[in-house]
Amino acid sequence: MITEHALLPVIPGQEEEFEAAFDQARHIIAAMPGFISLSLSRSIESPNTYLLLMEWETLEDHTEGFRGSPEYQQWRALLHRFYEPFPVVEHYNQVMSAQPANSGTTEDPA
């Protein structure tokens, strides 16, 4: 599994319209082979900047499958007009994670 990361700089004043368009676009991407999940978060400090995190089964599911599909053209038509400048998209492999110390698990007494 890989994580796609993108900071989306939306043109100021178009945030509400962007969110409505993204609501439509998420259904397009959710139907793509290899898609696992996405989250879209809005910056508190910079309200016209959004953080998009997506999980894919493989890098190629995103870079070749989705970006090479007709559905990508629909995604572009809905969303790309909102960005200034165009976002940088990067992909990551998870190295480690953590959960709260009191996550309800019991310690092994051995």
Image (cartoon, rainbow, N blue to C red):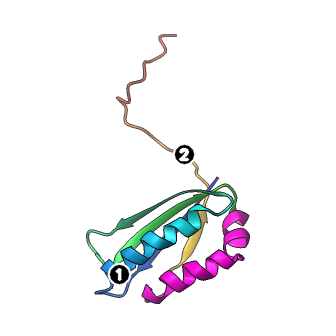
Distance Cα–Cα, label 1 vs label 2: 36 Å
Q: Nearer the viewer, residue 67 or 97?
A: 67
According to the image, label 2 marks what residue? 96
Within 10 Å of disc 2 (Cα), the crowding (few <14, some 14-19, many 20+) is few
Q: Residue 72, relative to residue 103: is it above or below?
A: below
Q: Residue 87, relative to residue 6: is it above or below?
A: below
**Quick check: is 80 in the magenta stretch?**
yes
Q: Position of residue 62 (x, y in %)?
A: 66, 67
Within 10 Å of disc 1 (Cα), the crowding (few <14, some 14-19, many 20+) is few
Q: Position of residue 85 (x, y in %)?
A: 46, 88
Q: Main secondary structure of the magenta part?
A: helix
Q: Quadrant of residue 58?
A: bottom right
Q: Tell me the number on the disc at residue 93.
A: none
Q: Position of residue 14 (x, y in %)?
A: 33, 85
Magenta region, residue range = 60-86
In the structure shown, which secondary structural element does the residue marked by tag 2 occupy?
loop
Amino acid under disc 2:
Met
Q: Residue 42, relative to residue 17: is it above or below?
A: above
Q: Nearer the viewer, residue 84 or 81?
A: 81
Q: Tell me the number on the disc at residue 17.
A: 1
Residue depicted at 38% across the width and 75% down the height: 20
Residue depicted at 57% across the width and 69% down the height: 28
Amino acid under disc 1:
Glu
Residue depicted at 72% across the width and 77% down the height: 68
In the structure shown, which secondary structural element does the residue marked by tag 1 occupy?
helix
Residue depicted at 47% across the width and 72% down the height: 24
